Amino acid sequence: MAALLLASTLTVMAGTVLAPVVSEIRTALDVSGTAAGLILTAHGLSLAVVSPVVGWTIDRWGLRTPMSAGLILYGVAGGAGLFTDSYGMLIASRFLFGIGAAAVFTGTTVALMALFQGPERDKIAGWRSTAIGLGGVVWPLLAGGLAVLSWHGPFAVYLIGIPVGIAMLITMPNVPPAAPGNRGGIVTLLRTTPRLLVLYALSFLASFLLYVLIVFLPQRFDQLGIDDPVTIAVITASVSLAGSVSGFFYGTMRANLGYSALLRMALALWGLGFLVGALVSQPVLLALSAVLFGAGSGISVPALAMLTGESSPAAMRGQAMALSGTANFAGQFSAPVVIGPLVGATSITSGFLMAAALAGLVLIALFFVRLQGAAQEPQAAQEALTVPSAPKAGA
């Protein structure tokens, strides 16, 4: 469980750890601003493209080896920036890094679904949400400290994937692949479980709204004359901190509320957060918008992950979770593309009001849709898991 939670923290630091040194990389490698920006986003393209393949691999060969290999690739490819001064090599390493990140994103969720059941699963899901939130604070801060030494420094943070991958290979129980007769492709998955399309749409929306906030909230503060990088970093980090707190209590909330109620709660917090961001001009109150949104994310992340896993056939769960990763990335990419023109033509306030309205419309729609996970897997499924034996003395 410790290795699983630590691996989960790596899912949120793919690009954020490099943000402090983008300008330095641009100068050192003599590239344009757009080219430097690709260093932050190139992994997202490969992540979105290969995620379905990663999911199929997990369904076909089991969980432990693909996930461990993905973590090691995450560490090796991510840490390659420590040793290269070539822009082409750096971009190539980022594409490889995205493949490893896809395995980590999908594998950690599938592992949670396979290894824990019932109330314990909900509790660990909440802890995972807390771990993800803390990772969104700790790793970027560590990277910022290393950035003082050199623009290469933040890449060292990715190396943590190597020991975590080895630990996962040693400690992860053997989750066997599904029987051949129960496997299928993405088309089969979506045809037999159309409700997944609704869940992918919600995952897309969650990431879309998150990146609207991350991209435009600092600009909103800049309009108020607050442009100190440390202050902005602390405010941005409050999204993750608030998510950690609400995620810690997710297990308790799940014991008393259904998935639909939890997602309505998250949407209400998101909508309120954007309303606060649009209507207030006091910096302290404006920071509250980040806290409200983060609290909602701490609820939605485990709820959507568990609901997607419980809604999909066990034999195709890897592919189901991988498609969730694709939806998340698509939401991140779309946010500035969709809201940016509106903000440019009007104001950030208008963009926030549009985001609040979107959250409100989906909130209303969820009052007419009942989302409920499938019954828990029988105990026989748990008994199929085997923990690797410890080496014998003298072996």
Image (cartoon, grey):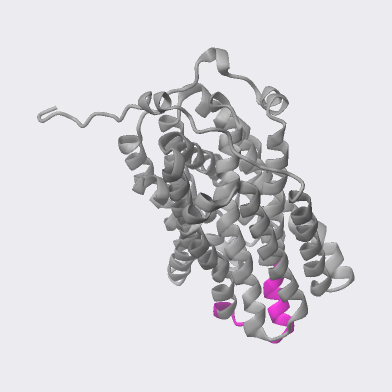
The answer to whether any part of residue 79 appears in the image is: no
Residue 75 in picture, x, y percent from top left: 43, 47
Residue 323 x %, y %: 64, 37
Name the residue furthest front.
Answer: 256
User: Which residue is drawn at the image coordinates 54% and 24% (left, top)?
Assistant: 315
**Taken as a whole, is the magenta stretch helix, strand or loop?**
helix
Near-viewer residue (373 or 247): 373
Residue at 72% from the left image edge and 63% from the top image edge: 212
Q: In this view, does 371 lie to the left or right of 301?
A: right
Quarter containing the C terminus: top left
217 up-or-down from 106: above or below? below
Compared to residue 347, the image places residue 307 above or below, namely above
Q: On screen, 278 above or below 341?
A: below
Residue 40 lies, in percent from the top left, at 61, 56
Would residue 272 be found to the left or right of residue 39 on screen?
Answer: right
Please say whether residue 219 is one of the residues in the magenta stretch.
yes
Q: Give the residue at the far top of this rendering.
A: 181
Segment tinted magenta in the rendering: 215-230
Verify whether residue 384 appears in magenta.
no
Number of callouts: 0
Q: Which residue lies furthest to the left in this view?
A: 394
Instruction: Report whether 249 appears left or right of 3.
Output: right
The foreground one among 43 and 91 is 43
In the image, residue 42 lies at what x, y percent?
A: 63, 49
Whether residue 258 appears in this view of the structure is yes
Point out the image quarter for the N terminus.
top left
* Residue at (39, 29) in percent of width and height: 382
**Residue at point 47% right, 42% down?**
108
Q: In this view, does 222 lie to the left or right of 253?
A: right
Looking at the picture, tell me which residue is in the foreground, 82 or 267. Answer: 267
